[in-house]
Image (tube, helix red, strand yellow):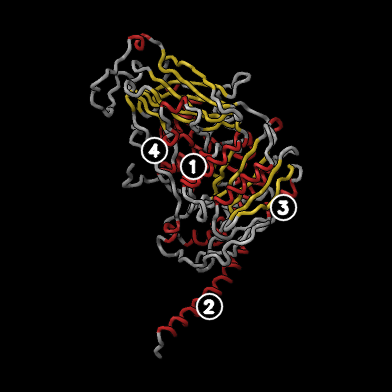
Amino acid sequence: MPRHSKAQHAVLVIALSATVCLVSCMTAKKEAAELKPPPSSHAAQAASPPPPSPTVSAPEMERLRALGYTSKDGIVGGVEGGVAGGIVGGVPGGVVGRMDLDRPGAMAEMNTEEYGRISDNPFLETLRNPLSTFSVDVDRASYSNVRRFLTAHQRPPRDAVRIEEMVNYFSYDYPDPPAGQPFSLTTEIASCPWNEKNRLLLIGLQGRRLDTADLPPGNLVFLIDVSGSMMEPNKLPLVQSALHLLVDQLRPQDRVAIVAYAGNAGLVLPSTPGSEKGQIAEAIDRLEAGGSTAGGEGIVLAYKVAKESFVEGGNNRVILATDGDFNVGVSSDGELERLIEEKRRDRIFLTVLGFGTGNVKDGKMELLADKGNGNYAYIDTLNEARKVLVQELGATLTTIAKDVKLQIEFNPAKVRAYRLIGYENRLLRAEDFHDDAKDAGEIGAGHSVTALYELVPPDGDLAIAQVDPLKYQNVELRDAASASPELLTLKLRYKEPDEETSRLVTQPVLDETTPIAAASENLRFAASVAELGLLLRESPYKSSASYDQVAEVASHALGDDREGYRAEFLQLVNAASRLKPQEGRED
């Protein structure tokens, strides 16, 4: 073999690399074209495959190829940059490469999903910690995400299981609020299914229901992630199908604009009346995926467009559809948080719709919705899109109360200790309850919100973490506490959507308990969903929880399950019961 100088060798390597890159780019462009979304069809359902297994069997490989994920030789990545409909730029050619999917563990290496860490709330001694304060949470993304895993016969990551979101995925038969009030308050106490020595407290809020015709005029901006990571069938194609469902609900007084972002951000459709459904649908169909992800730039432009078309007294909202994988420009959680907090001062709310598998940035999307005075849903199927954007349109897009906070003062003579189930990332300091500058959760029209506490009775033998006696003051029980018939006092603060001063609601709760079997369907079903969450999280507080008990309690509390969501829950319980526990899991 002839020898070459270092310079000649470098030239040879560059030439060969350029040839390989050219061939790969041509192949990637051809195969990316095959993944281009089909023409508009409001009835078409985008595929929503489950998260891939760590190893891929031959039948699974064929299924992935049929869906367009792979070619004969592996996964193809990289498409020409830019965004159809008005964005110039992007990353020409992207990053082209192939991965051998038949190699064991290859698919697991591709999974870059991220979830914020959650440690279960502990039991707190009432005498030293009489106040429990938290923000409401109407996000429901965790349940549909958990469903994705269970349907694929996989155990969800522990931090993907947020119990409050699982419980709040379902609606409950709470009474409608009194005239002039945004929501009603319901409380109920029963024995705890997974620990018969303890009690379970339910707190339920029911938001005022509004017919679609009665919703305020909408000024909506669709902010669509069309980066290369959104190419798969359960991402941009499903986004397009979901948005078509929403467009079908628009009225002439509503307006819609579309902003898309990849390497750059651009205006695809200026603010357009809802009567122009054909024009809006055509703009949605023109979207194509490719390039990097400048999410921060897209957010800035979307809020600018929403502000320019602002409707006084209307529903001014940005609807972000993404997998959350921002990688260009403003992308860190801290930067995004500050950006969203700045924009929400313009009275523009944010709804985040998460899509896809493999690289879902769940924690980032939840953060955006939380800081943007909005809500977060995960869309795994077109049926879920129909639930969020059609059946629950008012709850998803119309805020009836903002900065909603709850504070419970427990009577230490009746409750030795308590534990809030879920809401770990919604906890507030006691002082935050009176601070109107402190951000909290929003409630949409027709939303129901449920919170559960596990209560230890005064003679309970639960081991509770102790602290040394105080040196300069006494912590004592008042005589009035023992004589009081009250178990607790519930206080709630909220603001009207266009106000900045909170209103206070106070309601005492008497010390009354029923057996779980005699409790309402509301409490029994909510308890069964929470118990499944404890099992999936392998919570240290699950006590005697079991899948059999979850199924038994839930099956007798299905209620008026017109949409079949509770029946589907029983199927997921069955699927979860067949999974093996994960090893080496720590908080």
Residue under circle 4?
Answer: 535
Mark-to-mark CA distance, 2 and 4: 54 Å
Q: Which residue is drawn at 34% across and 24% down?
A: 129
From the image, tell me which residue sits under label 3: 282
CA gap, disc 1 and disc 2:
44 Å
Secondary structure type for disc 4: helix
The reply to whether discs 1 and 2 touch (Cβ–Cβ < 8 Å) is no
Q: Which residue type carries mark 2?
A: Thr
Crowding around mark 1 (Cα neighbors within 10 Å: few <14, some 14 to 19, many 20+) is: some
Indicate the position of residue 161 as horizontal and vertical percent values: 44, 40
The type of residue carrying mark 4 is Leu
Mark 3: amino acid: Glu
Residue ID for mark 2: 19
Residue toward you, 544 or 406: 406
**Mark 1 → mark 3, Cα distance in angstroms:** 32 Å
Q: Residues within 10 Å of mark 3 (few under 14, many from 20)?
A: some
Instruction: First in sequence, mark 4 or 1: give its number.
Output: 1
In the image, 407 versus 198, the foreground residue is 407
In this figure, which residue is indicated by the disc labeled 1?
367
